[in-house]
Structures are given as structure tokens and as C-alpha cells.
Amino acid sequence: MIGVDNSLMAWGFAAAALAYALLGFLVARQGYLKRPVNRPGVAILLAAVLTTTWAGLSLLALAAPIWWVWAAVADVCRYAAWFAFIVFLFRASADQGRALDAAPWMAPLAVALPLLSLLSLVFSAIWFQPSGGAPVGLFLSMMLLSVLGLVLVEQLFRNLPEDALWSAKPICLGLAGIFLFDLYLYSQAVLFAGIDQDAWNIRGIVHAALMPLLLLSTTRHRNWIAKIRVSRKVVFHSATLLMAGGYLLFIAGVGYYVRYFGSDWGRALQLALVFLALVLLIALALSRSFRAHLRVMLGKHFFSYRYDYREEWLKFTQTLSTQSAPGETGLNVIRGLADMLESPAGALWLRRPDEKLYRQVARWNLPQQSQTEPVDSALLDFMHRTGWVVNLEEYRVSPDRYENLTLPDWLQAQAQAWLLVPLWLGNELLGFVVLGSPRTRMDVNWEVTDLLKTAGRQAASFLAQMQSTEALLEARKFEAFSRMSAFVVHDLKNIVTQLSLMVKNAKRLSHNPEFQADMLMTVENSLERMRQLMLQLREGAAPGGAAVGVDLGRIAQGLAQSVSRRGRELEVDVQPRVATRGHEDRLERVMGHLVNNALDATESPQRVWLKIDRFGSHARVEVGDNGMGMSESFVQERLFKPFQTTKEAGMGIGAYESFQYVQELGGKVSVDSREGEGTVVTLLLPLIESFQESDWHQLGEA
């Protein structure tokens, strides 16, 4: 455009002409002109030819300035070709049924702005004189072209699927670089009423340097164009960029006139205005209220539906599922519903299963409410009858629309309250959410209420799951306590049986010194066991103490003596030096339970035996009898389960506890029983080989 004899400029335009001539040649070889014609490919070919023409004419303009007009025409036309390339890509996606034309303004702007630039060029060529000032109108139109180019590239890049990024990313980067450089060049020209000569000198070099990126995309994958699709979300982001570009254009125009009319201090005012404009732009970008206004405006004027339901549902589900600490489900429900409507505050009211009133359980930027709402109040009755989302702003203006609904005092006192969203779990009203007034004015139409009702049902399911989890945890605590209590009661029953037998024998043997010593030892042992049981019940755990070596033979002898005091006989066959590792009192309780069960299943003449020996790497404990026995189905399905027993007065805890402890030690339990023939229970416990040197032996001798 400016005829200056500059060797750097000449080399730059020459390099650009050669580079884009090469691009046009390589693109032409890819067959885009064959039927069916690939319109985006033809647009690339046309853009390459026009860019080559522009660079060649610019080179001629260095020698004869009259050529600058035709170079400018070619410059505008190459912009139009690149715009056509991007528009054709979006049209191709829409024709294939993979995307809707979500930006109807794209094609008209892609045609109108180049025509406006050509019109400005004609006026500048007719009325502009070199000594009369710069063609600011032409600079403004070219600046608009570069802004639109950035908008279209941003639209394209944001909506590329993953499989198309590899092919399309280079051309997006190349076009963005071209448009961005031209935006800088022409915005400087508008602000300072003249082309920046240094930037103009390297324009050809910049365009030539970016050509390989354009070429790279066209050679990577021939079908990458077919993979581009449009999403609704891109309109919001592209509109943001378009508004920013329009804002900068406005500031550029104001800055120009301030400089023009400001005389000597115009330059200082211009710099101050540009700085303040940048600060204001950043403030608007960070303002949630501004973004809220923008979303509402776009939802009203660009779409038949206000929401992208897929995006809203994914965001809402992610909000509900995000928990940085236990008990945050209620707060997440409030924020999820509030974010849908740009509301900055909310409160959640829930009814506990064991209560007949609703109370506030979570809040966000709303005051704490200690009042409760009964289930039979006028508000809850209205929500049950209608299922409506209550618009409190509409209610304050026209209460007749809500069948003369009467609001509670705590709700009337909240001027910030805006919507009441019911949380339905089936036909049950689990609770409701009070949302605060939005950051921007928003119409609550059928689409908003339907979205809130559906989101409320999903939120209710999350809250019900939270309540069920809390109830389950509480039930598990009671279950653990009940199970522990059952174990304690079972052991107490054994102690009571032992003491009862001792009292019964005391009537006959009270003057026998040996019986007195045995009775004293029995009482002391029973007292210690009851202390352990109380400790277990209080602390909620099994008896403490580290596992030590246990002589199984000594336990067997003690059991034989205890049985003999009951007037029965226990046949004991013990192999010497058979030991295992565990808690001696618990092992004694396990073996004693098996022996007692065998005694209960037999009469006096029938046999009960206890055999201890080595079985490979295990210590084997066998307790048998030839009594009534058990059925196979009982052994397989019920024997080692709690509260399952064949005894009339039994609890079914001993077998379960014995089985659990043997499993804990790493042992095994096997049962061989036949009805009318008897039962044999075999325990396999880990064997300790070094009997004499083990710690348990020293402890036993102490």
C-alpha cells in the first residue's frame, strides 16, 4: 500500500509469493477440484492463489505505487477465501447431520465485511491523497477483517474432535498467526493514524513463515475436514471474543479522535485511555455478573432452548459427586442448583426419617435459620398438592397465581429468597431448596422450572443415599455392639454354668480341703474372665495381649479335670509337645466349647474324646462323640453362622466364635457328623516346632 523502496520489504513479499505459489501447487495436486468438489479444499486453493497474487502485486507496488490499490483488493479477497474455507467446514458438518449450524451470523459476516473493506478501499483510492492524511476508514475495515478471522479460527479450534486435532491444529495456528499479526498492524494504524513502517516491512516475511503450518494440515490427513463438528458451547466463547474485538475497535476509534482533537496533549490522553480500557476489559472478564448477563442474552436470542442440557447435567452431576469432606452433599446440592441459574446463595431444608418437620441442614451465603417447618404447614401442603417450583418474586407481585399461598414468617423475612425448589423422592417430598436472587435478571419460564424439577429429583436421590448411608453406618455400629454382646453373654453363660456346678457340689464337698482349693481357684478364674469380658464390652474389641506359644496338651488336661468334676468322663489322647501360637484363654474357650457340645449331645454311657497330635505342619485337635449327631444340611448351611443351634436353650454363638478365631489364627475347621452316629470336629492349627525353647514354656512355668 505504501511505495517505499525497502529491500527487506521486497524480499519479504517475494518470499511470500513463492511460498504460497508452492502451497497452491501442492494443494491443487490433491484433487479438490474433482467431482464431487470439496468446497473447503477449493477455498484453500483459492486463498493460496490470492495470497500469491497479493504478494506479487505488493512487490510491484514498491516500484510503481499505483499497484497498491490492486494489492489491497487481493489482500481483501484472500481474507474472503479463508473465511469461506472455515464457513464451508461448518456447512459440511451440518450437511452430514453431525452438527447444527449454531452460528447463523457466520456466513453473512464472512461476506459483508470483505465487501465493506472493498467499499472502503474504493473511497480511499478516489479521495485519499498522500499529503492529506491516512485512510483511517480502510484501516478500520481491515482491522474488522482480522478480528472476524480470529473469531472464526477460534470457533473452528474449540470444536475439533480429538481425532481431528492432529491434522487441523497446524492450519488453525497458521491462520491465527496471520490474523493476529494483521490485527496488530491495523490497530496500530488506527490508533496512530498511520502504518507502523517496521511492522509493514516484515509483513511478507511473517506470511511466508506461517505457510508451512498451512501446508502441514493439508498433507497430514485428507479426511480431517469431515471430522469437524459444531457444539453449542462455542457460540458463547466466540461471542465473548467478538465483543472483545468490538470493544477494542470502539476504544481505537475513541483514541484516534482524542489524539486528533487533543493537540499537544492528545498522545498522553490516548495512552491513558488505552490503559484504562485494558483495566476495564479485565474487570469485565472477571465479573461473574457480566458473564451471567451474557449467558442470559445469548440464551434468549441465539437458541430455541436456553440450556445445553448435556453440559448442564454433566456439570450438575459432577458438583453433586464432589466431596472434599464428609457431610458436604447438602452444600453441593445447593451449589449445583444455584449454578444453573446464576444464583449466588441458597439453603437446603430436609426432613429426617424419624421427624415430622423440616429443618435447615445446609446454607450458602444465606443466614442461619433455627425455625422448623412442620409437614402439615400451608407451604408444605401447597408443594405436595401442586409440585410447583415457587417463584417468590412472582408471588410477592401476584399472590393470586399461587392460590393465596401463605408463606411462613422466616421465609417472608428473607428478601433475598427467590425460588423454592422441591426435592421429590418418588412421591415423597424429601426437602426443598431456597435459592437467592440471581446475579442478573432471569425469566423463570417452563424450561427453567422443568430443569429445576428434574435436577431436584436427582439431588433428592443423592440426599436419600446420604441418609441411607448414615443410617447404615449407625446400624452397623449397633450390629457390631450386639454381636459383641452376644459373645459376652455366651461366655457369661459358660461361667454361670461352671459356678452353678461348683455351688451344687459344695453342698456335698464343702468340708473337703481339695474341693475348697479347687473352688477358690475356680472363683478367681471366673472373676478374671468376667473382668476380661467387661473390658471387651467397654472397648469394643477382642481381648488384648500378644499371641504366645500355647501348650495344647495342658489345655486338654485341664478340660479333662473340669469334666470329671461334672461326673462325666473325657477320653484324652495327647501326643507330647504339641503347641500352637495364640491366646491361651481363647483357645481354651474354643476347645471347651467343642467338648461341652459333645457332652450335651451324649448320655453318660456314650463316649466323648479329645485327641491332640501332629499332622504335618499343623497341630491337630480332634473332639468326637457318638451321640445324636447333626444333619448334613445343618453342617453345610447353618453350623458356623451366628444364632443357629440345635439346642433348645442355646444361642448359636459358640460355634461361630470358634470358627472365626481359628480362621484368624490361620487354621482350618472340618466337621464329620451323621445323625444318630455322632460328630467329629477337627481343628488344624499352625504348629510350633521348638517346644522347649519357646517363650510359652517359660511363661507356663512361671
Image: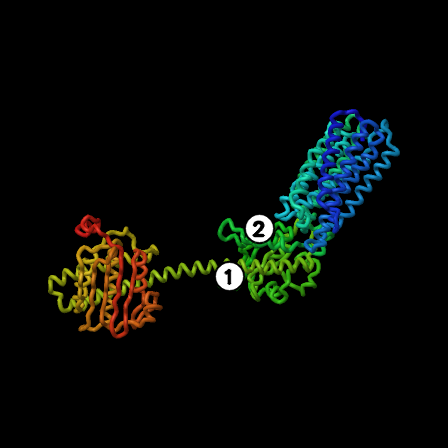
Pick whichever, 193 or 22, lies toward us.
Answer: 22
In this figure, which residue is indicated by the disc labeled 2?
364
Residue occupying image coordinates x 60% and y 66%:
384
Q: Is residue 471 left or right of residue 220?
A: left
SS at circle 2: strand
Classed neighbour count for the residue bearing mark 2: other residues with Cα under 10 Å, few (<14), some (14–19), many (≥20): some
- Which amino acid is tagged 2? Trp
In this figure, which residue is indicated by the disc labeled 1?
352
Pick whichever, 379 or 276, lies toward us.
Answer: 276
Pick whichever, 540 or 79, lies toward us.
Answer: 79
Checking the image for residue 415, the label placed there is: none
Q: Earlier in the sequence, mark 2 or mark 1?
A: 1
Q: Is residue 191 above or below residue 301?
A: above
Give coordinates of residue 560: x percent, y percent: 18, 63
Colour scheme shown: rainbow
Q: Can residue 183 be seen by looking at this rendering?
A: no
Q: Is residue 313 left or right of residue 93?
A: left
Q: Is residue 100 left or right of residue 61?
A: left
Q: Is residue 135 above or below residue 339?
A: above
Residue occupying image coordinates x 54% and y 51%:
322
Give coordinates of residue 344: x percent, y percent: 62, 49
Classed neighbour count for the residue bearing mark 1: other residues with Cα under 10 Å, few (<14), some (14–19), many (≥20): few
Give coordinates of residue 659: x percent, y percent: 31, 61
Residue occupying image coordinates x 67% and y 65%:
403
- Which amino acid is tagged 1? Arg
